Amino acid sequence: MTAGETKPAESARSIAWARRRQAAGRVWREFATDRGGLIGLIVLAIIVLLAVLAPVLTNEADLNVTTTELPPRDPPSADAWLGTDRNGVSVLLLIWWGARVSLLIGFSAALLSVFIGTAVGILAAHFGGWPSTILMRLTDFFLVLPTLVLAIALAAVLPRGLGTIVLAIGVASWPTTARLVRAQTLTIEARPYIERSRALGAGHAHLIGKHVLPAVLPLVFANTTLVVANSIIAESTLSFLGVGDPSRPSWGGILQAAFSSGAATQGAWWYLLPPGIGIVIVVLCFTLCGRALETVLNPRLRGQG
Amino acid sequence: MSEVLTGAERKLDADDGGGGARGAGLVRFLLGKLGGALLSLAMVVVLGFLLFRMIPGDPVVTMTKGRPVSAEQLAELRERLGVDKPMWQQFIDYILGLFRGDLGTSYIFQRPVADLILERLWPTLLLVGVATALAIMLGLWFGIRAAWRRGSGFDKLSTGTALTLWSMPQFWMGLLLLIAFSGAFPSGGMRYPDTPPDFLSQSLDVAYHLVLPCLTLTAALYAQYLLVMRSSLLEEMNSEYLTTARAKGLRDDLVRRRHAVPNALLPTVTLVFLQFGMVLNGAVAVETVFSWPGLGLLTYEALSGPDLPVLQSTFLVLAAAVIFMNVLAELLYRILDPRVRAT
């Protein structure tokens, strides 16, 4: 604000950017004081990095079930630190590559879900009237439907594949975001600067793009981290129920293969524990980050922790 | 977690109340809620139809995949299943069938779907009922104590445990219990075939089989009740009436039990009903792991076909159950909270 007063030559755009940078810095400093959120972020960064670098750090050919020389379903040994699966492939290698699928689907499904939710939420709040009534009716309807059951139905009727799972989770899980975004948009649109902008002749696109969206995005961002966590759990459950892509097993797909080959009743713990622990760690990290971000961005929650 | 919380608040905020005479308000409220529920139900029915008819590919071809069938056989099968008629006629047949309780015939089981559903309904009700009751008791007990001693070691431990359990896929939790206890408890099914047919031994047998699935579902569900109870009690704890109660010289224990908890219970109780969809999600996963012969396992078995009539019907039944629970939640909130009733 002071920058604008002392240097009137500066353009409105650069002032706005300076303010945004400042705000981002403030959010980061507050986020960094939350130990849980920081730990979550660091662990996530390491896992994502490892997953991305899997083709460099490991040999993909070792995943091939026809050329493996390890004995099937062998407990952990020097050759395979986490034992082998039913085909004699190292479990460590499996979850390393499975992380790529799980994270990819988790992120994509969350993005789709948040995109639908944000669009519906902003449109419903901005336009009001009967379009809003219809959109909110639709949101309430999807909010009520049991997510997993809807996703199962979608995955059952669409061709198998990663895209289907992303679509099923995205379509089933957007309503919470829509309600959140709608509430936030309503409070923002009630502020005087929106009225001023409207009086100066701003159209719908300008109002939404320049004023509403930037104000809503931080909250959407915090919400996304929580949605990713839910999407990863949903993906693992869907894969476990057998609607995943068997050629590219995610963590849930590995567990499905383990379960259907009787690993649970035969006590093959090394086959069942690691993929699940992977899911729990990633989900916990996302939840920690999301909660920390929410606390920073939503002052109402501060001090409740 | 806050997602769950705000979900409950948001749903309840929608309660506009209106004003005017109390009796008229109540009637209007009831009609509005029931109308909304009926509309949702109608949308589920339509969605169920569209979802399972608009699929790419011919269901008859999918059904007979891998088997040598002649063109006449395919045509006959199409006629028997009614998929040769135009879409609008199929829709009318489907609606009329629903009113008659006719949900079609299962591809896999070769039996009426309605019979299958009725048969599988009771195991699910038993599992979900017992697990939810246990989860509520556990969640409230831990949630109240965690909030009351906020920041203590007990609070950190119980909230941390709850968050971790909440981050686990429910089916994986089931697999863990299966590894740990498969010797002590049966690993699947609902009863042994050789149990004597008298009521007592049958019940004991079912209870014995229920232990592991029920434990899994309880562990998966209690976390959300704990976290909601904790945060809603934390909100109450800043209230002035608690200071008054303490100033009157009431014991800490009484302040908590008589004053704080009843008020904080409201959001939690309604949440139990609002989050029923999550309970069903859990049931599908847990029933699959433990081969518990309920609707969840039926859905899983139908997926391998895919047995579309069965999937369509389980979708209808489960969604209808959730809608019903949501109406109950709205009514219950109205009954429990005098402030809402008065408006």
Image (spheres, rainbow, N blue to C red):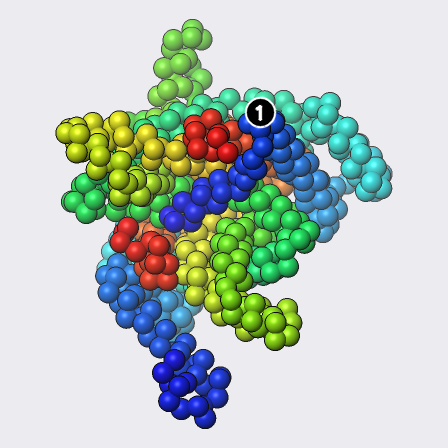
Residue B188, percent across and down? 41, 29
Residue B298 appears anywhere in the view: no
In the displayed structure, A65 sits above or below B341; it is below
Residue A121, percent across and down? 56, 57
Residue B235 horizontal side relative to residue B81, left or right? left
**Amino acid on which disc 1 is placed:** Gly
Toward the viewer: A78 or A9? A9
Bin the neighbour count of mark 1 within 10 Å (Cα to Cα): few under 14, some 14-19, many 20 and up: few
In the displayed structure, B128 sits above or below A215; it is above
Residue A101, percent across and down? 46, 61
Residue at 25%, 47% in the rendered image: B160
Residue A5 horizontal side relative to residue B125, left or right? left
**The residue positioned farthest toward the bottom in the image shown:** A9
Is disc 1 placed on a helix, strand or loop? helix
- Badge 1: chain ID: B
Residue at 62%, 30% in the rendered image: B28
Identify the residue under disc 1.
B23
Number of dots carrying numbers: 1
